[in-house]
């Protein structure tokens, strides 16, 4: 096969590709709603995932408050033991 035929075919294909992928106001107007729907979908899915993780954290450890209270009490007791009597 002749190299000039191949180069000509590649050049013609590249020229056609420029028109296919050209960013024009018409193309942007057609694709913007599709992109917007995709972005909204992404944010909705992220929100659902965040909500599920938050719910699982709150439901998974019911004694979370009790542990916090115990830590506070232990700190208060340790502080009371370390202070000198006046």
Image: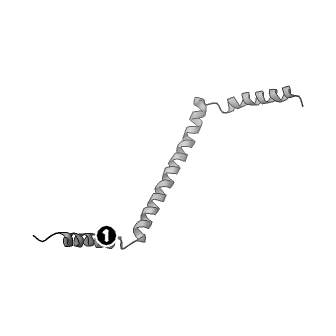
Task: Please name the residue shown 53% across and 43% down the image.
Answer: 36
Q: Position of residue 8 (x, y in %)?
A: 81, 26
In the image, residue 30 above or below residue 43: above
Say which element carries label 1.
helix
In the image, residue 42 above or below residue 25: below
| Residue with the mark numbered 1 | 68
In the image, residue 1 above or below residue 83: above
Question: Mark 1, residues whose alpha carbon is within 10 Å: few (<14), some, or many (≥20)?
Answer: few
In this image, 64 relative to 82: left or right? Answer: right
In this image, 31 relative to 17: left or right? Answer: left
Q: Position of residue 78 (x, y in %)?
A: 24, 71
Looking at the picture, tell me which residue is in the foreground, 10 or 21: 10
Task: Please name the residue shown 59% across and 38% down the image.
Answer: 31
In the image, residue 70 above or below residue 40: below
On the image, which quarter does residue 30 sit in?
A: top right
Looking at the picture, tell me which residue is in the foreground, 11 or 76: 76
How is this picture coloured?
Answer: one colour
In this image, 33 relative to 73: left or right? Answer: right
Q: Position of residue 65 (x, y in %)?
A: 32, 70
Task: Please name the residue shown 55% across and 47% down the image.
Answer: 38
Q: Quadrant of the N terminus?
A: top right
> Which residue in the rendered view is the most extreme toward the left?
86
Task: Please name the residue shown 64% across and 30% down the image.
Answer: 22
Exactly how many numbered labels are in the figure? 1
Looking at the picture, tell me which residue is in the foreground, 3 or 16: 3
């Amino acid at each position: 096969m002749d190299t000039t035929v191949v180069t000509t075919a590649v050049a013609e294909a590249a020229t056609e590709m420029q028109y296919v992928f050209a960013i024009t106001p018409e193309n942007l107007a057609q694709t913007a709603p599709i992109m917007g729907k995709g972005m909204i979908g992404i944010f909705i899915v992220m929100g659902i995932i965040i909500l599920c993780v938050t719910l699982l954290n709150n439901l998974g450890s019911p004694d979370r408050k009790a542990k916090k209270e115990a830590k506070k009490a232990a700190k208060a007791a340790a502080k009371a033991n370390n202070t000198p009597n006046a």
